[in-house]
Amino acid sequence: MVVNSDDGKLPKLAEWEKSSEKGEELKDVPEKWKGDFFEQWIGLTPSLANLDLRPYIYISQEDKKRIIPNNDFSPEGRAALTALTETKKYNGSILEIIKRVDICEIETIFENLKNKAKTLQWSAISLLQLLHIPMAFPELGESYVQFLEAMPANKREPSIIPHLANQQWASQLLEGWQNDTTTPSRTITAIQVLRKGHR
């Protein structure tokens, strides 16, 4: 659809973005696009309706391998990946499923979800999905912190703050966000409120 257009724009994209913004049903979506990924993607900002999308659709096979779930995962790994990608919020019950997976395999899943989060422009849901892994494997906390440090400041979501507050590996990150004027004000407030509550 994009490749065949004269200007690289998707004709229905503006309509879908408006429907998503209003919380309305997305109409006339191709069957192969239907699902959580597309619904999250269409709701991202900034709007893509007026952009030439052709430069962005050429994903190498190697990129696809990093983003798309690996069919060679163990049954435990596949169960963990399914649980992580289907949840829309932090769910502590998933941690036990994750802990059954070998650390080497969970690191691969971790990298897959990091790439997915980048593809979704660090959406709140993708960050919460990813957060489950260092919560189950604290030794991966530093890797999660490095991932958060590399994302744009305006993506620092307040929704993850309550879950980071009690994690020693996240203490310096939260302090840095709190003192950084580019951090969204609601995120700074969330950090301040939680820190007052833990004194």
Image (cartoon, rainbow, N blue to C red):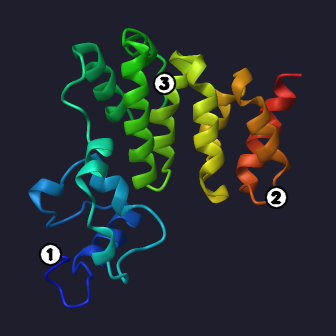
For disc 2, the marked residue is: 181
User: Residue shown at 37%/81% (left/top)?
Assistant: 51
Q: On residue 1, which mark appears?
A: 1
Relative image position of residue 131 (x, y in whole percent): 52, 31
For the C terminus, the quadrant is top right
User: Residue shown at 55%/24% (left/top)?
Assistant: 134
User: Residue shown at 27%/82% (left/top)?
Assistant: 9
Q: Residue furthest left?
A: 31
Q: Amino acid at mark 1?
A: Met
Q: Is residue 14 left or right of residue 27?
A: right
Q: Badges 2 and 1: C-beta atoms under 8 Å apart?
A: no
Is the residue 68 above or below the residue 55 in the image?
Answer: above
Name the image quarter holding residue 77: top left
Q: Is residue 11 left or right of residue 162?
A: left
> Which is more foreground, mark 3 or mark 2?
3
**SS at circle 1:** loop
Relative image position of residue 157 (x, y in whole percent): 61, 47
Q: Earlier in the sequence, mark 2 or mark 1?
A: 1
Q: Amino acid at mark 2?
A: Thr
For the N terminus, the quadrant is bottom left
Relative image position of residue 41 (x, y in whole percent): 35, 58
Res. 159 in view: no
Q: Earlier in the sequence, mark 3 or mark 1?
A: 1
For disc 3, the marked residue is: 133
Whole-angstrom CA distance, mark 3 to mark 1, is 37 Å
